[in-house]
Amino acid sequence: MSQTSIPAPPKTTVSFWRPRAALLYFPTVCVLLAIAAVAGISIGSTYIPWETVARVIAGHLLPAGWVDVNGVTQAEQVIIWMIRVPRVLVAGLAGAALAVAGTQMQGMFRNPLAEPNVVGVSAGAALGAVVAFVTGLAAASALWLPLCAFVGALGALAVVYSITARAGRTPVATLLLAGIALSALLSSVTTLLVSLSFVDWQVSAEIVFWLMGGLDSRTWTHVWICLPFVTLGTFVALWYTRDLDLMLLGEETSASLGVNVERVKKTVLTTAALLTGAAVSVSGVVGFVGLVVPHAIRLIVGPSHRVLVPASVVTGALFMIGCDLLARTIHPPTEIRLGVVTAAFGAPFFLYLLRQRGKALGYL
């Protein structure tokens, strides 16, 4: 009597990642991140040796008297601790936030070419910031600009979700189309406000510079503004890595494996908006970070979000700190806008990815 073979139960995890590549990737990127951070603090209009940078930072972090800072001038201490350290930290936080948000959006839409702005979050943050400039709130307090940008990002997500949600379900295709339409609408309103503000040249210049992205004049206030949201968003993204891995198999398959698909969508969208709003609120509109960084990491370590999310944190921070350093040093004393540098690196790489994808699908 022949025995009927019982099929093995489906796996409840998606683990297509490359262990060897990951083991090499993380130490390498962490070392490069440390080097980039030190270089970002040392290099500038006034060069400061890295030994001095280490002494000043250790003097502020360790108990008084543990590190001798005698010989370091007051001007160097101010430049290091009050100007460059906050700027590097803001760059790292913004880069990590945008990269993690991009990883989440690409996983949820199952499209490696997705980015945080596909649901209009960046456009909403930009509109909120422009409103702060036009109404004079940005000049009244340093807190109003990031607050308005953050509210704009979450408001855009709320509008998109309210439009697309029907009977407790949110079709991904409808969500994508609604996000693109709302992003175009918000961008047109932003452009209208910018054109109306040309009467006040100073305000219009501040708006244009902010829309091009930049980290000039960032202080510890901006660090404390974005740090809680970036930390919270990253922990939530790490918590949902398994669900995002299963979502790669399709909504029906992931639901059959126990994933609450609609809850995952809401959480991922909210987290991505939280991260994007926090980043845009302190760095301005910076493109291609959330698109290129996750895709580049995926090519190296594989598509598993258990590896992608932590890798996006360190790689996004490295990419943003490096781009900010180039923006400050390419053409001194003029500082190139950060969004220009990220686009200069991101756009060619994006076109390369499109070409490679076309070849793989037989289009090119």
Image: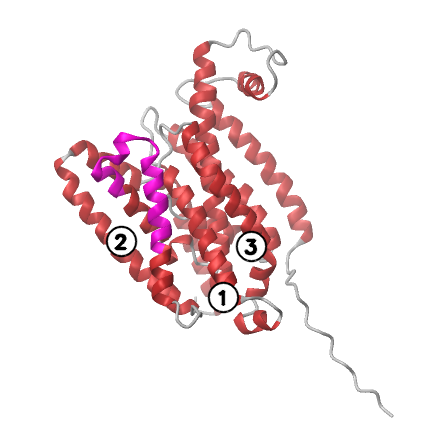
Can you say which quadrant of the picture contains the C terminus?
Answer: bottom left
In the displayed image of the protein, which residue is found farthest to the bottom?
Answer: 1
Which mark, by number, is residue 130? none
In the image, the segment drawn in magenta is: 130-156
Can you say which quadrant of the picture contains the N terminus?
Answer: bottom right
- Please check the rendered image and state whether residue 147 is part of the magenta-colored stretch, yes or no: yes
Q: Position of residue 244 (x, y in %)?
A: 56, 60
194 horizontally vs 8: left or right: left
| Label 2 secondary element | helix
Q: Position of residue 245 (x, y in %)?
A: 59, 61
Q: CA distance from mark 2 to mark 3?
A: 33 Å
Q: Amino acid at mark 2?
A: Leu
Colour mode of the rendering? secondary structure
Q: Residue at x 39, y 20 (%)?
A: 45
Q: Earlier in the sequence, mark 1 or mark 2?
A: 2
Is 325 drawn above or below residue 362 in the view shown?
A: above
Which mark, by number, is residue 262? 1
Are circles 1 and 2 on residues that touch, CB within 8 Å?
Answer: no
Disc 1 versus disc 2: nearer the observer: 1
In the displayed image of the protein, which residue is found farthest to the right?
Answer: 1
Q: Position of residue 71 (x, y in %)?
A: 53, 7
Q: Nearer the viewer, residue 295 or 86?
A: 86
Q: Nearer the viewer, residue 138 or 331?
A: 138
Q: Residue at x 44, y 60 (%)?
A: 355
How crowded is the residue under tag 3: few (<14 C-alpha within 10 Å), some, or many (20+)?
Answer: few
Q: Amino acid at mark 1?
A: Glu
Q: What residue sits right under mark 3 in the picture?
A: 299
Q: Position of residue 232 (x, y in %)?
A: 52, 45
